[in-house]
Image (cartoon, rainbow, N blue to C red):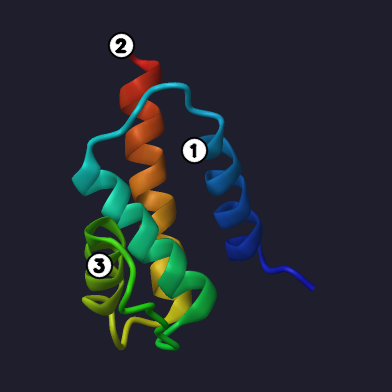
């Protein structure tokens, strides 16, 4: 059964997925890292033959090593709310 945090996380993900505007790369990396930490925790996987972009994504995720999945979901939600508020108040 999904918790309220899980439902809010899923909603934030869905709303961000609907954005038509591109987000800055640093914001995208943060979202990626929080998402991966929230959904996979500290179970890191990386293909060493991947391109540089994937290396940056992996590095951003590894920087969250030790963060709980719940905390990562909360941080993702906070960042999503900031993005959505900024994009819809223009």
User: Which quadrant is home to the C terminus?
Assistant: top left
Asked whether the residues under the numbered discs 1 and 3 touch, taking CB atoms below 8 Å apart as contact, a structural biologist would say no
Give the residue drawn at x 25%, y 67%: 55
Outermost residue to the front: 49
N-term mark: 3 or 2: 3
| Nearest to viewer (mark 1 / mark 3) | 3
Q: Nearer the viewer, residue 66 or 71?
A: 66
Outermost residue to the right: 1
Locate residue 71: give its quadrant. Answer: bottom left
Q: Position of residue 88 (x, y in %)?
A: 40, 18
Cα separation, mark 1 vs mark 3, equals: 23 Å
Asked whether the residues under the numbered discs 2 and 1 touch, taking CB atoms below 8 Å apart as contact, a structural biologist would say no
N-term mark: 1 or 3: 1
Q: Position of residue 63 (x, y in %)?
A: 21, 76
How would you rate the neighbour count of disc 1 (Cα within 10 Å): few for under 14, some for 14-19, many for 20 or more?
Answer: some
Q: Which residue is mark 3?
A: 55
Q: Which residue is mark 1?
A: 16
Give the residue drawn at x 68%, y 68%: 3
How would you rate the neighbour count of disc 3 (Cα within 10 Å): few for under 14, some for 14-19, many for 20 or more?
Answer: some
Q: Nearer the viewer, residue 62 or 8?
A: 62
Q: Which residue is mark 2?
A: 90
| Nearest to viewer (mark 2 / mark 1) | 1
Residue 46: numbered disc: none
Please give left or right for residue 14 compared with residue 50 in the image.
right
Dot 2: element:
loop
């Amino acid at each position: 059964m999904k918790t309220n945090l899980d439902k809010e996380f899923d909603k934030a993900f869905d709303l961000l997925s609907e954005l038509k505007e591109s987000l800055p790369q640093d914001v995208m990396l943060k979202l990626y890292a929080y998402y991966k930490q929230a959904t996979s925790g500290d179970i890191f996987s990386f293909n060493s033959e991947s391109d540089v972009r994937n290396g940056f994504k992996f590095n951003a995720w590894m920087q969250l090593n030790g963060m709980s999945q719940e905390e990562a979901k909360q941080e993702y939600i906070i960042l999503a709310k900031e993005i959505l508020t900024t994009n819809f108040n223009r």
